[in-house]
Amino acid sequence: MKALQFWLFCFIPLWMLTFCTPSEEEITMDPGAQLQFSTDTVFFDTLFTDTVSFTKRFRVYNPQRNAVRLSSITLGGGDNSTFNLAVNGKYGRNFQDQVILGKDSLLVLVEVNIPSRDENTPFLVEDSVVFVTNTNLQTVNLVAWGQEAYFFRSDSIITCNTSWPADKPYVLYGSVLVDSLCELVVEEGAEIYLNRGASMFVAGTLKVNGTANQPVLFSNVRLDLQNAPGQWTGIVLLEGSKDNRIEYASIRNAEFGLRLGTPDNDTIADLVIANSIIENMSSYGILSFTSDLRAENLLINNCINALAGHFAGGHYIYQHCTFANYSIGIFNEAPALIFTDNLELADGSLLQADLYAQLQNNIIWGDYQDDEELQFVPSQGPSFQVLIEHSLIRSEDEDFDINNNILGTDPGLPGFVDPSMYNYQLDTLSPAKDRGRDLSIDIDLLGNPRDMLPDLGAYERIE
């Protein structure tokens, strides 16, 4: 009798332990137990070769009441795969005996490093993640596009009289310098991608020769961040730089688009920029100090500070330009355009120089809280000359109510098609239609012809 009581005493706790195991922890061996996935395909945007991608992720769900054991999680390409996985904090290409509790999930991270190929055009790279559970085999596809590039992995000085053709992109992990007395020519269709902290410095001359059909692109290395200010530093024209020309370029997602510090004793434009777009800046679109600039058919939009800030004087001509700051994903903190003839330096001294600003056939608009998108800050010393005519301005300042300018603060007044989609062309009811004067700028930003009564801004509406 005592022996029987002993065996019952030993047996009952084990029986109770088995009986009390939660069902979500009991591992089912049912071959009908299927996994579910948050996606059937993980897509990577185009990636430059020999660089580690950003991380993508997906979830593996167990919809069963009981737990399931994944006997293996592997990459279809095995050890030769260009992809890597991370499961439960461990990296690799092959994982064994992973358990997912009932009604629970597992997070899988994916990276890819595409090796170089002798191909100038983008190429497809594919693999799959293979899951084996109770003899069931299920897969999630992995798809990426690779792109060869010219890489600048550290700070570099450009060889004099260099040309960058459009056969492959240019990827700058460090900054580059166009040295004094040297010229860099960027050919039509070229694409330049800059990493965080990288800049293009120009002490000599920069010529950007884009066309309407093949513009030149300056943007960020992270191609998955399409509209993200502050991803690289900017293009800097240094003192002594001259004869710069930018035609049909798109400059995107930097701290500033262009920074000019080119003081000299003449008013000849050290930079001419035409038929170009500057957008998504965490600071200024154009930041200029005592410099000479001429712009036409230029769109600047979506900057946290001014779209164009001009300090300590200079000589500036803007014709058929659209300045539009609508706080798309940001909050702008300054008027669209600022002109001053002075700048207070860090030591408290004041830098002053003559200022000349000529604004014709422009649209100057945004949602800055003070309703005034155009600001002039003269001091008492230098010459301060301003010509504003045939322009649509978000302002109530009576000083601007001259020379056929259009003033107002109604949000719908400029008549853009859709600023939220970066479309600053004019709609059918825009008051900017046919309100310009003939400046002999015969085509617009898109290459469309202007008529005898040109529209204001960078775009001519074609009816």
Image (cartoon, rainbow, N blue to C red):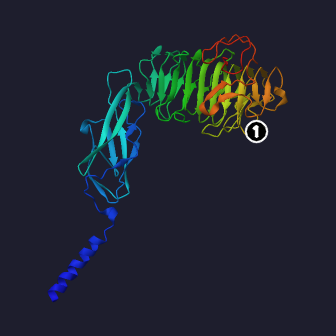
Per the image, the residue denoted by label 1 is 370
x, y (%) of residue 31? 25, 52
Is residue 259 among the parts visible in the rendering? yes
Nearest the camera: 24 or 408? Answer: 24
Residue 407, x across and y down, in percent? 79, 28
Report x, y in % for residue 374: 75, 30
Q: In the image shown, does 111 or 265 lie closer to the viewer?
A: 111
Horizontal side, residue 233 vs residue 378: left or right? left
The vertical placement of 195 against 298, above or below, is below
The quadrant of the picture occupied by the C terminus is top right
Front-most of residues 293 and 279 = 279
Residue shown at 20% from the left, 82% from the top: 8
Q: Quadrant of residue 318?
A: top right
Q: What is the quadrant of residue 448 in the picture? A: top right
Quadrant (top left/top right/bottom left/bottom right) for the N terminus? bottom left
Q: Secondary structure at mark 1?
A: loop
Q: Along the horizontal axis of the image, is 24 left or right of 193?
A: left
Q: Residue at x 56, y 26 (%)?
A: 251
Total label count? Answer: 1
What amino acid is labelled 1 in the image? Asp
Label 1 neighbourhood size at 10 Å, few (<14), some (14-19), many (20+)? few
Residue at 34 percent across and 62 percent down: it is: 24
The residue furthest front is 32
* 89, above or below 128, in the image: below
The image quadrant of residue 437 is top right
The residue positioned 43% from the left and 33% from the top of the image is 45
Specify whether 342 is left or right of 284: right
> Residue 400, image x and y in percent?
81, 26
